[in-house]
Image (cartoon, rainbow, N blue to C red):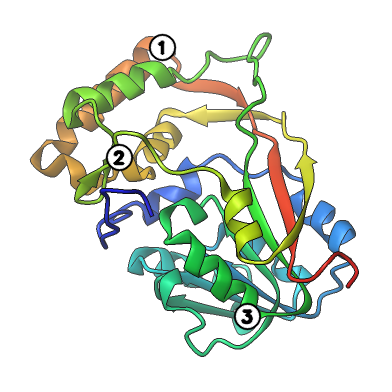
């Protein structure tokens, strides 16, 4: 947990409906890469901690006999349930509204646990220790994130780039220069150093996997607006009575960058760190 900041239930309030359209996808080969690296065969149990609207859990559902998604936000849990029904996998999915700090919560044991861009919001040391206890012998933990260090050039693509710097300036103009997070602020951002946390919890590893992205994505103004409202630091409720004015300014900035309302960018690569409950192969 970040010093001086406390989690509260407004952190992602109102963002769930914007995720599916707004968030950039994980690299398209992620499921195949994990299936090969971990020898997943459609059996076993996956727990996705901080599952959001089920993005990772549902993308890996065919690799497990059962998946359990845990998230404290009711909107995320509702969206995950609807998405599972839409993919006809609701029968093998369970969505639990709970904070990671309340685990094990009677959920049983698992072969794989995943944190997909969620671990930094948690009280990390106790959560890592509890998740390790929930893994079966030989189980693994996956820490999944977009690869932050790669350039994603848009040269030669058919439409202009999304004006991310201008959008960031707009958020600061409306919400102030310090990053908002629920009812609090994060002047120094969220913590890193996940490797040290997992090592302290007794995990072995890691093995690093990089699943290449780079696919060309076409984005509309609506897509980008949803992306903005899917972020904790620009969640809809933070704007209070100025949300409509903010959205109008976002759309104006987007039209200035691309009169056609179309943008191009490349999908990010996905970085996965694999940690074992025991020594690899043990």
Which comes before the other along the chain, label 1 or label 3?
3
Which-is-in-front pick, marks 1 and 3?
A: 3
Q: Which residue is identified by label 2?
A: 186
Q: Nearer the viewer, residue 29 or 220?
A: 29
Q: Which mark is residue 134?
A: 3
Quick one: label 3, few (<14), some, or many (20+) residues within 10 Å? many
Q: Nearer the viewer, residue 61 or 124?
A: 124
Q: Vertically, is 221 above or below 111?
A: above
SS at mark 2 in the image: loop
Which-is-in-front pick, marks 2 and 1?
A: 2
Q: Which residue is identified by label 1?
A: 257
Q: CA distance from mark 2 to mark 3?
A: 31 Å
Q: Vertically, is 38 above or below 234?
A: below
SS at mark 3 in the image: helix
Q: Which mark is residue 92?
A: none
Q: Classify residue 177 by image quadrant.
A: top left
User: Going by the image, does 86 lie left or right of 188?
Assistant: right
Q: CA distance from mark 1 to mark 3?
A: 49 Å
Which comes before the other along the chain, label 2 or label 1?
2
């Amino acid at each position: 947990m970040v010093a001086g900041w406390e989690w509260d239930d407004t952190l992602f309030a109102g963002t769930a409906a914007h995720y599916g359209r707004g968030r950039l996808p994980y690299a398209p080969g992620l499921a195949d890469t994990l299936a090969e690296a971990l020898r997943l065969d459609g059996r076993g149990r996956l727990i996705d901690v901080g599952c959001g609207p089920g993005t990772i859990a549902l993308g890996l559902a065919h690799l497990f006999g059962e998946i359990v998604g845990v998230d404290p936000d009711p909107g995320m849990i509702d969206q995950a349930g609807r998405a599972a029904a839409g993919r006809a996998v609701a029968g093998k999915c369970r969505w639990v509204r709970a904070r990671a700090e309340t685990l094990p919560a009677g959920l049983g044991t698992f072969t794989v646990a995943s944190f997909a861009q969620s671990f930094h919001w948690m009280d990390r040391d106790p959560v890592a220790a509890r998740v390790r206890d929930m893994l079966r012998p030989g189980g693994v933990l996956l820490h999944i994130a977009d690869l932050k260090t790669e350039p994603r050039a848009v040269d030669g693509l058919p439409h202009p780039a999304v004006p991310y710097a201008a959008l960031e300036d707009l958020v600061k103009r409306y919400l102030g220069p310090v990053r908002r997070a629920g009812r609090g602020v994060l002047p120094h951002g969220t913590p890193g150093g996940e490797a040290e946390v997992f090592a302290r919890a007794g995990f072995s590893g890691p093995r690093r996997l990089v699943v290449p992205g780079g696919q060309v994505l076409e984005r509309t103004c609506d897509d980008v607006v949803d992306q903005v409202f899917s972020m904790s630091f620009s969640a809809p409720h933070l704007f209070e009575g100025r949300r409509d004015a903010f959205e109008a300014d976002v759309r104006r900035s987007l039209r200035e960058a691309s009169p056609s309302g179309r943008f191009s960018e490349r999908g990010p690569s996905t970085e996965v760190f694999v940690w074992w409950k025991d020594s690899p192969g043990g």
